[in-house]
Image (cartoon, helix red, strand yellow):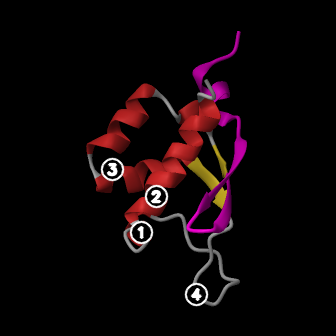
Amino acid sequence: MPSLAQMAANSATVTFSWQGLDFTVAYFPGKLSDAAIAQIDAALDSMNTEIVGLVQSWNVTENDGTTPFPLDAARLVELPVPFKQALVRAMIRDNRPN
């Protein structure tokens, strides 16, 4: 039988657009539980922490256009809140298509 750890280890990729730019994110759909969604909704600090736990990789870069922007909750505070909300919505929609 599959365990919770096995479900959490699976990854998926979702692409979403924000302000005319396309972003591709690999994340862990098995970690996107009701509890994770509730925490994301609770506070922005929590959202940053949850994003770091959910996102495996992404194509967001530093201003030099080549250095990957780190998946670090302390650095995510630099990103626009609407971008982070769009990212979370894209992952949720990818898991709940209907």
- The answer to the question of whether label 3 and label 1 lie on touching residues, with beta carbons closer than 8 A, is no
What's the distance in space between the residues labelled 3 and 1, CA to CA?
15 Å
What's the distance in space between the residues labelled 4 and 2, CA to CA?
18 Å
Q: Position of residue 85 (x, y in %)?
A: 44, 53
Q: Position of residue 71 (x, y in %)?
A: 53, 64
Task: Look at 63% across and 29% down and name the residue there.
Answer: 97
Please report whichever mark, 3 or 1, sits nearer to the chain's N-terminal start: 3
- The answer to the question of whether label 2 and label 1 lie on touching residues, with beta carbons closer than 8 A, is yes
Question: What residue range appears in magenta?
Answer: 1-25
Q: Nearer the viewer, mark 3 or mark 4?
A: 4
Which residue bears the numbered disc 2?
Answer: 84
Task: Look at 34% across and 34% down and name the residue there.
Answer: 38
Q: Name the amino acid, label 3.
A: Ser
Q: Name the amino acid, label 1.
A: Pro
Please report whichever mark, 2 or 3, sits nearer to the chain's N-terminal start: 3
Left or right: residue 27 versus residue 42 is right
What's the distance in space between the residues labelled 1 and 4, CA to CA?
14 Å
Specify whether residue 87 is painted magenta: no
Q: Nearer the viewer, mark 2 or mark 3?
A: 2
Q: Name the amino acid, label 2.
A: Lys
Say the numbered circle drawn on residue 80: 1
Element type at marker 4?
loop
User: 10 Å neighbourhood of mark 2: few (<14), some, or many (≥20)?
Assistant: some
Which residue bears the numbered disc 3?
Answer: 46
Tell me the quarter of the picture where residue 28 sits.
top right
